[in-house]
Image (cartoon, coloured by chain):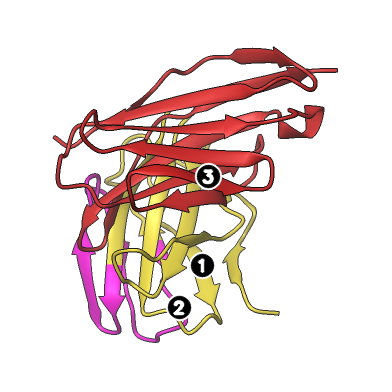
C-alpha cells in the first residue's frame, strides 16, 4: 500500500516565525509532489508543486524535495494568522492516481 | 469564470436511500475524480475517469457508482450499500498528465440521519 505520512499536529508557531511542515512517502517511483492548503470546511487549494530534487520558492513558501530520503517539506516564512489551516501533502507516482496524506494542522498565533 | 461546481453544498440522507452528488467543470479537463474525506483523515479516492464513457474504481469504490456521459459532468451516486456515507465529498479535475495538479470543487457534506 502506497503511503504518504504527515505529522497531524497541531503545529503552533508565533506570527512572523517560520513554519516547517514535513511529509514522507513510501513509493520510490513517485515523481510529482504537491502541497495543498485546506481551511476548515473548505476544499483544498494548491500552494506549491515540485518535481525535482532541491528547493522551489514562491513568495513566502518554499518546497523542498529529497527523493533519496523520500521526503518533501514546505516552509512558510513570516507566518501569518491567515496561514492557519491544514496542509495536505500529495504524491503522484504515475498514471492518474494521487495519494494524499492526512494533513498537518498549522496554528499561527497573533 | 472557469471552475468546478458541486451541488448541493449540504445533503441529508435517510438510511436506505440513494443520493446523487453533482460535479460539473468547464475547464475542458479530460480527467475527473471523486474523493471522500473523513475528519482527521486524508482524501481517499472513490472513482476516477480519464475520458468520457470510461471510469475506474479507486481505493474505496464499494457502495458508490458514477457515470461519465459528458466531458463536463461526473456525478457520484451514494447507494444504500455504503454503510457509513457521512463524510465530506470532493470532486476534482485535471488534464490527466503526470505533472498536472488537480483542481477541486467546493465539496458536498453528506450526513446520514
The x, y position of residue B7, in whole percent, is: 60, 63
The x, y position of residue B12, in whole percent, is: 57, 46
Is B52 magenta? The answer is yes
SS at circle 1 = strand
Marks 3 and 2 share the same chain: no
Q: Which residue is mark 2?
A: B73
The answer to which of B21 and A22 lies nearer the viewer is: A22
Mark 1 or mark 3, whichever is nearer to me: 3
Toward the right, the furthest residue is A110
* Picture residue at 63% right of the left edge, 32% below the top: A76
Q: Chain B: what color?
A: yellow
Q: Chain A: what color?
A: red
Query: The disc numbered 2 marks a residue on which chain?
Result: B
* Picture residue at 32% right of the left edge, 74% below the top: B67
Is A63 magenta? The answer is no
Mark before the other along the chain sequence, 1 or 2: 1
Marks 1 and 2 share the same chain: yes
Q: Residues within 10 Å of mark 3 (few under 14, many from 20)?
A: some
CA–CA distance in space, label 3 to label 2: 24 Å
Q: Which corner quadrant of the image does residue A100 belong to?
A: top left
Q: Which corner quadrant of the image does residue A14 belong to?
A: top right
Q: Which residue is mark 1?
A: B22
| Prevailing SS of the magenta stretch | loop
Q: Is residue A81 left or right of residue A57?
A: right
Pointers 1 and 3 in contact (CB under 8 A)? Answer: no
CA–CA distance in space, label 1 to label 3: 23 Å
Mark 1 or mark 2, whichever is nearer to me: 2
Q: Which residue is mark 3?
A: A36
Magenta highlight range: B49-76
Pointers 1 and 2 in contact (CB under 8 A)? Answer: yes
Amino acid at each position: 500500500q502506497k503511503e504518504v505520512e504527515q505529522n497531524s499536529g497541531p503545529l503552533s508557531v508565533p506570527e512572523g516565525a517560520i513554519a516547517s511542515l514535513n511529509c514522507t512517502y513510501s513509493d520510490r517511483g513517485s515523481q510529482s509532489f504537491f502541497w495543498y492548503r485546506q481551511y476548515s470546511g473548505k476544499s483544498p487549494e494548491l500552494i506549491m508543486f515540485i518535481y525535482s530534487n532541491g528547493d522551489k520558492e514562491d513568495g513566502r513558501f518554499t518546497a523542498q524535495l529529497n527523493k533519496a530520503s523520500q521526503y518533501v517539506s514546505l516552509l512558510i516564512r513570516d507566518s501569518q494568522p491567515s496561514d492557519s489551516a491544514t496542509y495536505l501533502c500529495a504524491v503522484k507516482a504515475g498514471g492518474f492516481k494521487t495519494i494524499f496524506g492526512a494533513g498537518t494542522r498549522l496554528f499561527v498565533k497573533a | 469564470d472557469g471552475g468546478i461546481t458541486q451541488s448541493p453544498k449540504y445533503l441529508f440522507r435517510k438510511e436506505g436511500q440513494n443520493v446523487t452528488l453533482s460535479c460539473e467543470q468547464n475547464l475542458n479537463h479530460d480527467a475527473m475524480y471523486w474523493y471522500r474525506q473523513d475528519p482527521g483523515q486524508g482524501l481517499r479516492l472513490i472513482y476516477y475517469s480519464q475520458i468520457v464513457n470510461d471510469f475506474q474504481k479507486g481505493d474505496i469504490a464499494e457502495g458508490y457508482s458514477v457515470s461519465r456521459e459528458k466531458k463536463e459532468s461526473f456525478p457520484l451516486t451514494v447507494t444504500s450499500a455504503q454503510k457509513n456515507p457521512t463524510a465530506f465529498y470532493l470532486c476534482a479535475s485535471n488534464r490527466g498528465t503526470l505533472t498536472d495538479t488537480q483542481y477541486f470543487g467546493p465539496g458536498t457534506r453528506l450526513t446520514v440521519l
